[in-house]
């Protein structure tokens, strides 16, 4: 009888230890292999776009830029973030095109990106990654993932399967609505005259402790010129034009903060806020130097949109935490890989 | 010998027990947060915002705990433990201390090498302890995961061993580190 009891307690010990072990593995998602996790999201990009050693999973083709941001002091009444105190802070930025292929040919309809890192005097940083569409194309991480596969080019035609695209839009009415807004937005001729939108909402808190929902954008000083339809002979035509333009004179954007009203959605980047919302111009971005992504200062930077200074906080938009998680996964994967130049090589940038 | 003196001898000192349970709570929280944040899109940001400052706090606690241990008298091992078991227990204790000290430093170091600002709370952030080098980041990031799983396995072994002694052998091993005072029999 004593032996039986002894064995029972021994077995009990084993069961308890295994139970505790399993509880931790459960937290790590080991028992939920279907869930969309940051690594599986990253795998999705690799499956759709292919694997390119050393490059970002998305917005792989890009160039580094540097310059400064001069705050006019108007932003201090919105947020106590140090960046809004009147004065100048250095900037490291990156212009890019969406997609995981760093050798892709530039095309007008491709989404253009601008990542910025504001280096603040107290050691804080503000990082933001913006694109040239007025709203985002999907409201949730899962919808983004589904869209990725729906738009995957068919190997036979080199274009997305229209049937799959139609099916995706039919099952994602928000995405269809967003596509309409994006489609009616005129595309400019280059990076230099594109407006870049932060898309997701954030919360700003000022020195009095008042918090407001905001969205931001960078409005170009360079005059708008509509993109000329038709194929370009130069597969880097957008980047080459940017390089020529920045070599000629510094490029400038005015940063505009749009203040949301209580009923404006903060959790849905596909829905524009009304045009009547108050806008505050808080400063000027000047970019005067361009370098290749291969040996430039932006290569080893993750433009994680949740690196925020005190005075800014994420909203309840589900895309924000997911972007932070997947950008980090992408950064971790490429950091240990061999680095190669993209189609925009270092010698191309010297021209 | 009074009862209380005997009790003091059987148990670790109050300060040692306090640090043990404080560390235990922090480490288990960190392991849970660490494991879940790398698997979560929705909670990644919230969890990492806790993971960073808690890791640094853990580093501070472990240093103080180690100094306290150096200046404390330890109770003897239970008679049920063989010399080999005692040697394993001492070595696993050293391993746990080393892991608890190294793991937060690797975390701090990898964020430094990745050039992430190491935000603790609000505008409070730590200085980088390594240069911006993504190859170094890649190595440290892998090390951070490997050390986390090693810590997890060491914890399970420690937990299992104490459970075995207390429940199967019934030698009162748990009482030595019990958060409450245990009177001698």
Image: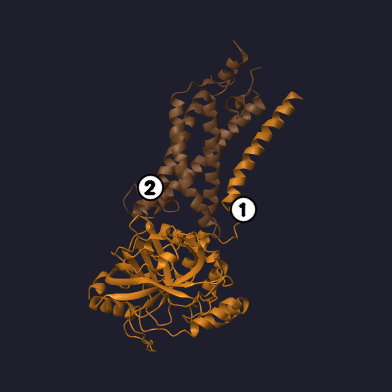
Q: Residue furthest bottom?
A: A229
Mark 1 = which residue? A31
Which quadrant holds residue B158? top right
Query: Residue at (47%, 40%) from the top-left corner?
Result: B58
Q: Is residue A129 left or right of residue A146?
A: left
Q: Chain of mark 2?
A: B
Mark 2 = which residue? B109
Q: Residue furthest top?
A: B1
Query: How far from the left and from the top, in percent, is residue B28?
Result: 55, 42
Query: How far from the left and from the top, in percent, is residue B143?
Result: 42, 46
Query: Residue at (60%, 76%) from the top-left corner?
Result: A172
Q: Is residue A245 visible?
A: yes
Q: Which quadrant, please, contains the N terminus of chain A? A: top right
Q: Is residue A302 visible?
A: no
Which quadrant holds residue A288? bottom left
Query: Residue at (53%, 64%) from the top-left corner?
Result: A315
Q: Residue furthest right?
A: A1
Query: Residue at (67%, 31%) from the top-left corner?
Result: A10
Query: How far from the left and from the top, in percent, is residue B81?
Result: 57, 22
Identify which residue, A107 or A283, lies in the foreground: A283
The answer to whether tags 2 and 1 share a subunit is: no
How crowded pointer 1 is (Cα within 10 Å; few <14, some 14-19, many 20+) is rated as: few
Query: How far from the left and from the top, in percent, is residue A136?
Result: 50, 74
Q: Is residue A100 left or right of residue A91?
A: right
Whether A192 is drawn above or below A305: the answer is: below
Q: Which mark is residue A158?
A: none
How crowded pointer 2 is (Cα within 10 Å; few <14, some 14-19, many 20+) is rated as: many
The brown chain is: B
Q: Which quadrant, please, contains the C terminus of chain A? A: bottom left
Cα distance between the residues tagged 2 and 1:
31 Å
The orange chain is: A
Of helix, strand and loop, which one carries label 2? helix
């Amino acid at each position: 009888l004593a032996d039986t009891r002894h064995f029972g307690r021994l077995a009990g010990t084993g069961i308890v230890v295994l139970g505790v072990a399993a509880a931790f593995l459960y937290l790590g998602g080991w028992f939920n292999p279907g869930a969309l996790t940051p690594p599986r999201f990253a795998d999705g990009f690799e499956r759709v776009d292919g694997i390119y050693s050393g490059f970002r999973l998305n917005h792989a083709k890009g160039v580094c830029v540097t310059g400064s941001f001069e705050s006019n002091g108007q932003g201090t009444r919105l947020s106590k973030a140090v960046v809004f105190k009147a004065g100048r802070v250095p900037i490291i930025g990156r212009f890019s095109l969406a997609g995981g292929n760093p050798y892709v040919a530039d095309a007008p309809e491709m989404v253009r990106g601008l990542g910025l890192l504001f280096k603040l005097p107290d050691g804080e940083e503000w990082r933001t990654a913006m694109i040239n569409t007025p709203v985002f194309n999907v409201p949730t991480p899962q919808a983004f993932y589904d869209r990725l596969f729906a738009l995957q080019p068919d190997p036979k035609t080199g274009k997305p399967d229209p049937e799959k695209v139609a099916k995706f839009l039919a099952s994602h009415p928000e995405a269809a609505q967003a596509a309409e807004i994006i489609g009616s937005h005129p595309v400019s001729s280059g990076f230099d005259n594109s407006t870049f939108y932060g898309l997701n909402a954030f919360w700003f808190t000022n020195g009095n402790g008042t918090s407001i929902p905001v969205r931001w954008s960078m409005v170009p000083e360079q005059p708008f010129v509509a993109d000329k339809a038709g194929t370009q002979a130069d597969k880097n035509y957008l980047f080459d034009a940017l390089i020529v333009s920045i070599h000629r004179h510094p490029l400038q954007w005015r940063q505009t903060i749009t203040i949301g009203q209580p009923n404006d959605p903060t959790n849905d980047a596909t829905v524009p806020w009304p045009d009547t919302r108050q806008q505050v111009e808080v400063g000027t971005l000047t970019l005067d130097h361009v370098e290749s992504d291969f040996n430039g200062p932006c290569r080893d930077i993750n433009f994680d949109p949740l690196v925020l200074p005190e005075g800014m906080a994420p909203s309840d938009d589900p895309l924000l935490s997911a972007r932070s998680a997947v950008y980090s996964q992408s950064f971790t994967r490429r950091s240990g890989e061999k680095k190669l130049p993209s189609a925009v090589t270092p010698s191309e940038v010297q021209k | 010998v009074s009862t209380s003196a005997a009790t003091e001898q059987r148990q670790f000192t109050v300060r040692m027990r306090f640090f043990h349970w404080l560390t235990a709570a922090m480490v288990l929280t960190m392991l849970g947060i660490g494991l879940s944040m790398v698997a979560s899109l929705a909670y990644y940001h919230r969890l990492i915002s806790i993971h960073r400052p808690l890791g640094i706090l853990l580093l501070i606690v472990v240093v103080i705990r180690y100094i306290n241990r150096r200046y404390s008298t330890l109770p003897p091992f239970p008679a049920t433990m063989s010399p080999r078991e005692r040697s394993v227990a001492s070595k696993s204790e050293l391993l746990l201390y080393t892991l608890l000290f190294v793991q937060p430093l690797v975390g701090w170091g990898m964020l430094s090498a990745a050039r992430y600002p190491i935000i603790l709370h609000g505008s409070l952030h730590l200085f980088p302890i390594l240069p911006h080098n993504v190859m170094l980041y890649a190595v440290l990031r892998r090390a951070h995961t490997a050390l986390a799983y090693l810590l997890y396995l060491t914890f399970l072994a420690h937990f299992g061993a104490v459970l075995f002694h207390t429940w199967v052998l019934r030698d009162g091993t748990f009482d030595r580190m019990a958060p409450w005072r245990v009177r001698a029999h």
